[in-house]
Image (spheres, grey):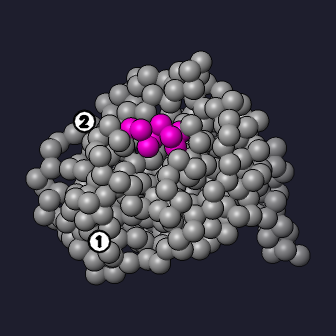
Amino acid sequence: MRCIRAALGSLACALAASLPATLPSTARAAADAARPAADAGAFDYRLQPRELADGVYVLVGRREDFSRDNGGNIVNTGFIVGSTGVIVVDTGPSRRYGEQLRAAIARVTPLPVVLTLNTHHPPDHFLGNQAFPPDTLAALPETIAGIEAEGAAFNDNMYRLVGDWMRDTEVVVPGQRLTPGRRTVGGRDIELVALGGHTAADLVLIDHASGTVFASDLVFHGRAPTTPHADIPRWLASLDTLGALVAKHWIPGHGSVGEEARALADTRAYLVWLRETVRDAAESGLDMAEALARPLPAEVRVWALADSEYRRSVVHLFPAAEKAALKRRN
Ligand SMILES: [Zn+2]
């Protein structure tokens, strides 16, 4: 097995081989789909932390759009329990989610939360911040700027989309500006990798002891990627960086969780296809409606939200592609 390349240090490849086998991805996806939905009447997200590796927990969200049924729980969050404290990776879409995540952590360990990360700035990743100690909240500088600039509008929009699940949710901007690198936090050997392309800043967390990568929204699995803030060439470069890792567990920002790197390959293939499809449509002189009518590849059609995310992507990517095509023709 090839270990991690020098740029990112030595992820614990040795451990990878010793970890227990888990369900194949299709069975995992079925298990994810069968999990109990949120209880909208009681505003209970029914969060169930799954221990993916020793001390590493993930809470898998629904592969859906925001709705009043799911309360915005469409995101994967997680936490890592060290010897002296807990690291939280993303706080979910609402104050209620953050509080229920905090309660779920307390059911697992009495240790305090010592670091709460927002991997990037869209709403489902930080609107639970209120539930966590303010001095633990941390993000990359561009993410902090994004929350400051767009957080209030995201919060208003979430109220419209999911209703009373959002009650009393307010934007809390992280105070700690993260720098990338390897460090020990809560007794856990972690590495923060600053990447981008899905948004201006996408934070990846490596837990060296377990060989786990929290890949943020740079990786989607079984659920079509979202691109409203995307810089696709930069995103592809970030996937190259991630592709240099040999990790045992990959936790995508959305979609099913698995130990194989298949999610990276799928995300890359989709982005390349999307970019080329939009560019080809513009170069061929098609209009946006014709670009929207382009068929999706069979392997993409089976993903959750494939049609709707393709439409969203074309709507915001096509004008620039059309402009570039016109410029080349003139
Ligand atoms: Zn997301």
Left or right placement of residue 328 versus residue 205 in this view = right
Q: Which residue is mark 1?
A: 184
| Residue 163 visible to the viewer | yes
- Label 1, secondary structure: give it: strand
Q: Residue at image x 57%, y 34%? A: 64
Q: Residue at image x 28%, y 81%? A: 6
> The C terminus lies in which quarter of the figure?
bottom right
> Is 103 included in the stretch rendered in magenta?
yes
Q: Nearer the viewer, mark 1 or mark 2?
A: 1
The amino acid marked with disc number 2 is: Leu
> The N terminus lies in which quarter of the figure?
bottom left
Left or right placement of residue 37 versus residue 186 in this view = right
Label 1 CB less than 8 angstroms from ligand 1:
no
Name the foreground residue: 176 vs 32: 176
Q: Residue at image x 20%, y 50%? A: 54
Which badge, 1 or 2, comes first in the chain's sequence? 2
Query: What is the magenta segment's predominant secondary structure?
Result: helix
Chain part drawn in magenta: 97-104
Q: Residue at image x 32%, y 75%? A: 183
Name the foreground residue: 309 vs 218: 218
Name the foreground residue: 227 vs 156: 156
Left or right placement of residue 196 versus residue 171 in this view = left
Q: Position of residue 149 (x, y in %)?
A: 74, 64
Q: Position of residue 306 (x, y in %)?
A: 59, 39
Q: Is residue 180 above or below residue 221?
A: below
The amino acid marked with disc number 1 is: Thr
Q: Is residue 205 above or below residue 163?
A: below
**Crowding at mark 2 (Cα within 10 Å: few <14, some 14-19, many 20+):** few
Q: Quadrant of residue 316?
A: bottom right
> Is 239 included in the stretch rendered in magenta?
no
Q: Which residue is mark 2?
A: 23
